[in-house]
Image: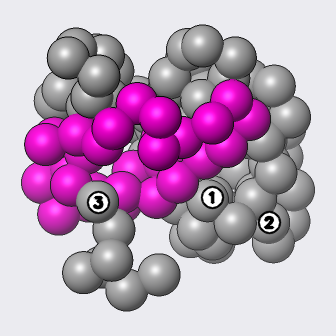
Amino acid sequence: MPESDRPDLAAGIPQEALAPGQMIEGTYEGGRVLLARVEDRFYAVGGVCTHYGAPLCEGLLAGKPVLCPWHHARFDLESGRATAPPALSGLQRYPVIVESGRVRILGP
C-alpha cells in the first residue's frame, strides 16, 4: 500500500472502520504500524516482519498471534514478542486508546 494511503494512527481512525478479526497498516511518525482488532480490543505493533521486512497487514490474524505472509514467523499482538521462527526479534508495541469513537495509538 502506498504510504499516502496509510492512515495516520496518531490521529486515529473511526472505531467502526475495523471489524473484529481485521487488521490494517497505518503510520506513526513515518513508521509502518499494524493495527488489529481482536474481539473488542485493539492492538498496535510494528508493521513489518523482523525476518525479511514483509508487510504484516498481508499476513494472517489468528486471534492474538499474527503470522507473517512470507515465511510464517509468528508474533504476539499483546506483547509484540516473536513466538515462532524465523523472526529475528519482537515487534515494537504501541499503546492504543479508544475515545470519542476513534481508535488511535500513542508513542511506543
Q: Which residue is drawn at 52% across and 54% down?
A: 24
How far apart marks 2 and 3 lie (CA) works out to 21 Å
Q: Residue at x 27, y 28 (%)?
A: 102
Task: State the mark number for residue 10.
Answer: none
Occupied quadrant, residue 18: top right
Q: Above or below — where is 94 with respect to 26?
A: above
Q: Nearer the viewer, residue 11 or 34?
A: 11
Q: Which amino acid does label 2 sit on?
A: Pro
Q: Above or below — where is 11 with respect to 15?
A: below
- Residue bearing mark 2: 69
Classify 10 Å Cα crowding around label 2: few (below 14), some (14-19), many (20 and above).
some
Residue 58: x %, y % from top left: 70, 66
How far apart marks 1 and 2 lie (CA) works out to 7 Å
- Residue bearing mark 3: 7
Q: Above or below — where is 63 with respect to 27?
A: above
Pointer 2 or 3: first along the chain: 3
Q: Residue at x 60, y 47 (%)?
A: 23
Left or right for 44, reference 10 = right
Residue 75: x %, y % from top left: 70, 36
Residue 72: x %, y % from top left: 87, 56
Pointers 1 and 2 in contact (C-beta within 8 Å): yes
**Is the C terminus in the top left, top right, bottom left or bottom right quadrant?**
top left
Instruction: Give the extent of the magenta segment.
Output: 8-35
Pointer 3 or 1: first along the chain: 3
The coloring applied to the image is: one colour
Task: State the mark number for residue 56.
Answer: 1
Q: Which amino acid does label 1 sit on?
A: Leu
Element at label 3: loop
